Image (tube, rainbow, N blue to C red):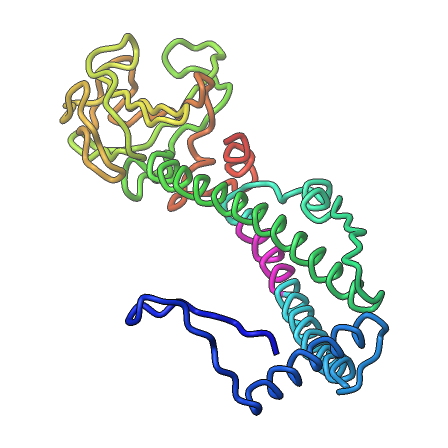
Amino acid sequence: MRKIYFFSESRVSYEPIRWSRLAAITLAILLFASLATMLAGFFGIDPLGLQELRADNISSENKVLRAQLNSLNAKLEEFSSVMNRLRASDDQLRTSVNLPHLSPGVRNVSIGGVKLNKDFGISPGANSLIVGVMKSLAVLQREASLQEYSYADILTKYQTNRQLFRHIPAIDPIRNGVISDGFGMRFHPILHVYLMHEGIDIEAEVGTHVHATGAGVVEYVGRRGGYGNVVVINNGFGYSTLFGHLSKPLVHVGEKVARGQVIALSGDTGLSTGPHLHYEVRKNGVHLDPVDYFFNGQQFNTAKLYAQLADK
């Protein structure tokens, strides 16, 4: 056998490697086994059954993956049912805050248009499972985004409504007052001509407490022609209220007032046939019948009020 040398640092010289017969035989066997394995792989021969073992492992993994995909698909279907219930509650919430329901067209946009025909290079059955899961997930993501938008819209409207309901003129300005003259055309008791009565008259002795009918800011305090002493409140959201024939205003311009707060004492000033309160409600400058806004008074026109709210 040809000798192989190595450099010895201790002797500072090249020394021959001494092979034992056993070591030489072992090395030869390993080289032969490696060469035989390579040749077997090249010619598709599997003497040790390794390919069958790998196939069994892949088959087992596929079964596990299929089971997991089926389980995931079932969970996505459960989430889809949850989204359907959320859609129904969303409609109820939007109704409660006076918002229109999301139209079918808008909702269809959230679930339509998801097209996946991707080929993952696997069996048709497994490929179909993966594509189905991906489509379901894409639909749920789009529905969830739409629902998030809708809930934000509902919250904004709810907060706006809370402000509106505090400011809308909704109670009698005089507790348990009796309306002596209503809203509309009437024969004026002093001028003796038919004129539009742009508010209502409520019987009240001089000095009776007059209450703000909704939150707002005092816009005017003083004399105003036949109205005598008046207080005008800007209630916001396009609403304003006027209180006339007062004996004594108790607020000043720029003062914030709350619903129910005493703002004046009733009287008999201006063009009046006797002690009473003249009360008006305006929306965007248009006179409305104040009785339509009484929650606690003689009547309450629900349809008319909600028609007003629908403009918001």
Would you say 122 lies left or right of 310 here? right
The quadrant of the rendering that contains the N terminus is bottom right
Q: What secondary structure do most residues of the magenta stretch adopt?
A: helix
Measured as percent of width and height from the top left, residue 259 is found at 27, 38
Instruction: Report the magenta residues as a range.
Output: 82-93
In the displayed structure, 147 sits above or below 129; it is above
Q: Residue at x 47, y 77 (%)?
A: 17
Measured as percent of width and height from the top left, residue 47 is found at 79, 86
Q: Is residue 91 magenta?
A: yes
Would you say 147 lies left or right of 285 here? right
User: How many numbered markers are drawn?
Assistant: 0
Q: Residue at x 47, y 70 (%)?
A: 5
Q: Is residue 7 magenta?
A: no
Q: Residue at x 24, y 14 (%)?
A: 228
Measured as percent of width and height from the top left, residue 182 is found at 44, 28
Would you say 73 lies left or right of 100 here? right
Q: Residue at x 39, y 43 (%)?
A: 297
164, 100: nearer the viewer: 100
In the displayed structure, 113 sits above or below 215; it is below
In the displayed structure, 220 sits above or below 250; it is above
Would you say 163 lies left or right of 142 here? left
The image quarter in which residue 167 lies = top left
Measured as percent of width and height from the top left, residue 303 is found at 56, 40
